[in-house]
Structures are given as structure tokens and as C-alpha cells.
Image (spheres, rainbow, N blue to C red):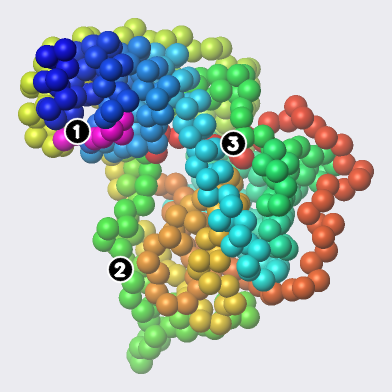
Amino acid sequence: MPMIMAQENEEYPLHRCIFQGDVKTLKILIGTHDIAEKDKQGNTPLHLAVMLGRKACVQLLLTHGAPVKVKNLAGWSPLAEAISYGDRITISSLVRKLKQQAREQMEERRPNLVAALHQMGDFYMELKWDFQSWVPLVSRVLPSDICKIHKSGASIRMDTTLVDFNDMRWERGDISFIFNGDQKPSHSLTVLDNKAKLFQRVRYEETELEIEDEVDILMSSDIMVAQMSTKSITFSRAQTGWIFREDKREMVGAFHADFYQINGMVLESRKRREHLSEEDLQKNKAIMESLTKGSSQGFKNGEPPVRRASLNPPPKSNITWDEYVVAPPGQCPLLGRNLVYKESSKSFKATVAMSPDFPLTVDMLLNVLEVITPFKHLSKLRQFVLMKLPPGFPVKIDIPILPTVTAKITFQEFAFRNDIDPELFQVPSDYFEDPMRNYDFLTYDASTS
């Protein structure tokens, strides 16, 4: 008991228990200490448990609700560190908990979201997406799309032909996404496949097969983080004219808009691959080569993946707790594998057109996007709109989606309407339910970013 009392009065007692593998004391302290506390390196107790391979501590922390979507000073999440360590059971546990916590957070926000939708007028809106790249071979095969959005009461319908889009693949289709906010959660999200005349009630819980598929992909891919740095972003009025320069003003659809140059927009990309074998690297290179040649599929092509086995643990760290805890911030001692690490940053020249005439406010748009953001590319739009923008509504925006790909989004049509057909938010009578189909673009992303 004296040892426990001593730990009660010191910095980071949970971290120390984990570092020393003291599960017994951790069980005693875990209920009275902040399970999400960060140490000088920005590591939470879960970070340390994963990095040091303390499997019992990992499971104990997850049982008590330790947050999974949190980054340390180096910008890595516990899931990223788990992939580096390579224990499959630990990675699976973190993926499950990450998805559970995302579901819980969404359900907490749901009542406020539904109330905000009820207060908003009903409308029809079109968003045009044009994807562009500075890589010629990639640019040649990039998709475009027009999203059509109907809103009535607490219901939203979005029709799209761009089903999924990320660094490995994109898929086209004729898909409608329907959210009925007044329905119970298990019936509030529906996806229609209008070509096949099928529908699926979207569940928020993945099957064991889907979880294990995702773990395989995480274990065989680079650990990647790509994020927009907003610290240095400023806006200046875009200019037009060769001799007599003046502020750029143009019509975007039916809306007058002032154009602004976005300065200091930098997409920071970091990746690690110390967990990958030479064979993994060759396979991943082949996938990227097929993409540049025009293939629209990545991991979904070819044979089903063989389940990845856990890696051999990294060499045991000789770092003591006393050495770790006094290390300067940002100079964390190596606790796992030697990093195989690369970082890059790319500056983007981008513009945003702000209209004072657009009938929707930015706050209203965010409420709509919160419903639709299970679509990965739409979540990027939401992240951008959360920035402090110039006055007005962003009717035309450039957004970096990937290090090599930029999207240009145009709000080309908007009208408040009181004649929205309620049948738009219902499943047509001639559609059949397809409970087996996996619309993975609607699942919670277990990305390490």
C-alpha cells in the first residue's frame, strides 16, 4: 500500500504502472485517475500500453473506455502504434473500440442534429465535385460527380454516382443515401442501389469478417496520416485584370460571389512502414501502378486476402521509467521498432468563393454535412468549412483530398422548397432488401489519422 500511496502523489501514475507492467496497481488506480491523461510526449496510458506490448493493460484500459482516437506529440494514435508493434489481437481490439466510440459520439450528437434539421427550411441543393491531380496519369482517370440533396423536416436524401473514393480505388454507381432523423437509429440510415433495385438498412456495427478484413488491410499497408495544417492559413482578396487590378467578383450559378485566395494551405503527409516486409512493399507498389494505368479497384480485386499473422515483437526496450519521464517533449525514447518514416508537405494554391446571397448559413451546412459525412470525401468538405472563413457562404471551394488529388466543389444550385416529395425518403415498393451487401463507404473509418 505505501507504493500505491506514493504513486497517488506522483505524475502520471497510470503511465508508470503500464511502463513497469504492474497490472495489479493499475487495476486499483484506474478508477480514480484520468484514463485519457497525456504525459510530456502526448502519450496516453493506452499509447504506452500498445507501444510496450502490455496486452493485459491494453484490454484493461479499453474495458474502462480509454479513448482510441487521440494523438501524441508525434501525431500518432494508439492504433498506429499497434500496427507498428504488429500484434493482431491488439489491433482488432483497438479497431472495435474505435468504431464503438465513434458510434457513441454520433448518438450523443443526434438529438441536437435532428432538432437543428427541424428548424431549418426544406430545400433542394446540388454539389458538383471535380477531382484534379498534378500527376498526369492519375488525373486522366479521376472521377467527377454531382450530388443531389433533398431535405424535408429531419430527413435528408443524397443521390450520388461516386460511391467510394480513396487512395487505392474509386467506384461508380447510382446510389441514394437516406437519413430519417425521426426514426429509431437502427432504421434511420438506408442505402438504395438504384440500378439493382436493392436497399440496405445501414447498421453501425460491422461483422467479425468485416473487422478482420479491415485489420488485414491495416497490417499490410503504410501507416498514414494526412492532415491539413490550418495554423498558417490566411485569406486575401483574389485579383483580376492585367493592367487595372480589382477584386475578383463573379457569378457562381445564381449567386454573386467574392473570390479569396487561400494562403498557407499545406497538406502534411506522414507515413511509416517498419511493420512491412519487402513482399508487402512490392504488392503495394503493384496496386499503385494499376491505379495509374486506369484501374478503379485496389484491394477488392484478386483473391481474398490470407489472414495476416502477428509479427514477432520488437526488441524489448531498455529504457527505464525514470529515463522516459524526464525526456524532453518531442524527444520520446524509442520504445518499439526502429521507425521507417517519411514525411512530406505540399502547398496548395486554392481559392474560395464566398457569397452573401446564398440562402443557407455555414452553421446550417455543417448540420447537413454531419448527416452525410459517413461518405469519406464529404467529411473533407466538413473539415474545411469548420475553418474560420471570410464573410458569406462558400459556394465554390478547392480542397486537397489526398497528397496528389484536389477536389473543386461548387454549390451550383440551391432553393428552399415546400413541395419536397415525402416519397423521396421512403424505400420504393419494388426494391428488395439486401442484408448481405457491405457498403463499406458508410462504416466508421479506422484510419490512423
Q: Look at the image and give the residue range highlighted in magenta.
A: 34-41
Q: Select label 2 or label 3 by which is in front.
A: 3
Label 2 or label 3, whichever comes before in sequence order: 2
Of residues 331 and 425, which is closer to you in this image?
425
Element type at marker 1? loop
Could you tell me which residue is drawn at 58 percent across and 73 percent down?
360
Q: Position of residue 65 (x, y in %)?
A: 41, 29
Q: CA distance from mark 2 to mark 1?
A: 32 Å
- Which quadrant of the view contains residue 185? top right
Residue for badge 2: 234
Could you tell me which residue is drawn at 33 percent across and 75 percent down?
236
Please state which amino acid type lies under the numbered disc 2.
Thr
Could you tell me which residue is drawn at 52 percent across and 38 percent down?
104
Classed neighbour count for the residue bearing mark 3: other residues with Cα under 10 Å, few (<14), some (14–19), many (≥20): some
Please state which amino acid type lies under the numbered disc 1.
Asp
Of residues 327 and 352, which is closer to you in this image?
327
Please state which amino acid type lies under the numbered disc 3.
Thr
Is residue 339 within the magenta segment? no
Checking the image for residue 443, the label placed there is: 3
Of residues 308 and 335, which is closer to you in this image?
335
| Residue 221 as seen in the image, left or right of residue 31 | right
Q: Select label 1 or label 3 by which is in front.
A: 1
Is residue 40 within the magenta segment? yes
Contact between labelled residues 3 and 2, with CB atoms less than 8 Å apart: no
Residue for badge 1: 39
Classed neighbour count for the residue bearing mark 1: other residues with Cα under 10 Å, few (<14), some (14–19), many (≥20): some
Using the image, determine if residue 394 lies above or below residue 35: below
